Image: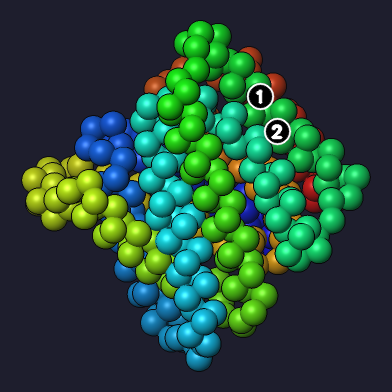
């Protein structure tokens, strides 16, 4: 299967899961939600590895690179992004993602020698145009930008890009399956969560114990879809796909999130969402030709 189809499935899952993440980041806290979804995803990856054939022999250095990618991207990077989602909302945060394909493209060229041909460049430009459409819509509604929240979002994007590069580097060095890579990455993310919780004094288990059963079930469903499934698909894409193109495709997560929001709130999509969807469709058509 094309790595871009895997990425599309991953962003679909993330778009659906983001409805739960945004809701409970505001109701509980971004740090706690990040810890919960990361720990639950780690458990799911462990079960999947055991059920599907067990662990393969791996060089300790390669496993540590996977863990480092999870520590940087899934742990620290996602914490910044969840904080930015809470402060700014998903629409305005996505303007910052416009620079991710540039960062990832430059790093992947310098490290892996991946070049951007004309078709991929047009696709990336169309994907970035979607981000600006969402940002323009958000700016019209709010009329201002929060500088501190923007800096937080920018930090999350840069760390996420570094995590993607480290993950691809680890795949190039090893022959691990994506599910095993995900397990080692999630271990790194859990280590980051433990560190952050100790710094900001978050009582993870006390909060978990006080949750109502219905809320716990909702968070479990959101974590399974938005963390476990989305990462399963996305790492399969990173393993062989063009990194700058995959980074630019991240806009589809916002498209799906906006679409699910319309569905759940029973409202018609805005003209901005329709325009962004058209541009994204053209970009995907060019990318898959």
Q: Is residue 252 left or right of residue 212?
A: right
| Residue tagged 2 | 128
The x, y position of residue 160, in whole percent, is 53, 50
Q: Is residue 129 above or below residue 218?
A: above
The residue that appears at 47% across and 57% down in the rendered structure is: 72
Q: Is residue 213 above or below residue 146?
A: below
Q: Splitting the image into 4 quarters, where does residue 6 fall?
A: bottom right
The residue that appears at 55% across and 14% down in the rendered structure is: 139
The x, y position of residue 152, in whole percent, is 45, 35
Pick whichever, 162 or 23, lies toward us: 162
Q: Is residue 284 above or below residue 4?
A: above
Q: Is residue 82 left or right of residue 161?
A: left
The x, y position of residue 178, in whole percent, is 55, 71
Estimate the spatial distance between the alpha carbons at disc 2 and disc 1, rounded to whole Å.
7 Å
Question: Quick one: label 2, few (<14), some, or many (20+) residues within 10 Å?
Answer: many
Asked if the residue under mark 1 is in contact with the one under mark 2, i.e. CB atoms within 8 Å, the reply is yes
The x, y position of residue 136, in whole percent, is 61, 16
Residue 63 numbered tag: none
The residue that appears at 68% across and 47% down in the rendered structure is: 103
Please say whether residue 56 is visible from this viewpoint. yes
Q: Splitting the image into 4 quarters, where does residue 4 fall?
A: bottom right
Question: How many tags in the picture?
Answer: 2
| Residue tagged 1 | 132
Q: Is residue 25 above or below residue 188?
A: above
Outermost residue to the right: 118
Describe the element under mark 1 as helix, strand or loop: helix
The residue that appears at 81% across and 63% down in the rendered structure is: 113
Please say whether residue 261 is visible from this viewpoint. no
């Amino acid at each position: 299967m094309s790595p871009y189809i895997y990425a599309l499935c991953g962003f679909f899952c993330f778009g659906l899961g983001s409805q739960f993440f945004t809701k409970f980041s505001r109701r509980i806290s971004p740090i706690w939600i990040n810890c919960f979804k990361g720990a639950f995803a780690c458990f799911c990856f462990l079960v999947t590895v055991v059920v599907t054939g067990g662990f393969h022999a791996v060089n300790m250095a390669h496993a540590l690179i996977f863990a480092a990618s999870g520590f940087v991207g899934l742990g620290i990077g996602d914490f910044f992004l969840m904080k930015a989602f809470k402060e700014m909302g998903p629409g305005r945060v996505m303007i910052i993602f416009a620079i991710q394909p540039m960062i990832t493209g430059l790093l992947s060229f310098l490290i892996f020698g991946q070049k951007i041909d004309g078709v991929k460049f047009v696709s990336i430009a169309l994907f970035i145009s979607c981000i600006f459409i969402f940002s323009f819509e958000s700016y019209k509604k709010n009329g201002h930008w929060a500088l501190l929240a923007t800096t937080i979002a920018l930090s999350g994007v840069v760390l996420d890009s570094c995590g993607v590069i480290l993950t691809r580097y680890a795949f190039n060095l090893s022959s691990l399956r994506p599910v095993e890579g995900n397990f080692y990455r999630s271990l790194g993310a859990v280590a980051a969560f433990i560190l952050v919780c100790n710094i900001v004094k978050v009582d993870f288990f006390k909060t978990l114990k006080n949750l109502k059963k219905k809320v716990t079930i909702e968070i479990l469903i959101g974590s399974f879809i938005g963390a476990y499934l989305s990462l399963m698909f996305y790492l399969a894409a990173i393993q062989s796909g063009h990194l700058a193109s995959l980074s630019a495709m991240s806009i589809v997560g916002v498209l799906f999130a906006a679409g699910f929001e319309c569905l759940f709130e029973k409202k018609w999509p805005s003209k901005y969402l329709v325009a962004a969807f058209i541009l994204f469709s053209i970009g995907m058509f060019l990318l898959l030709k």
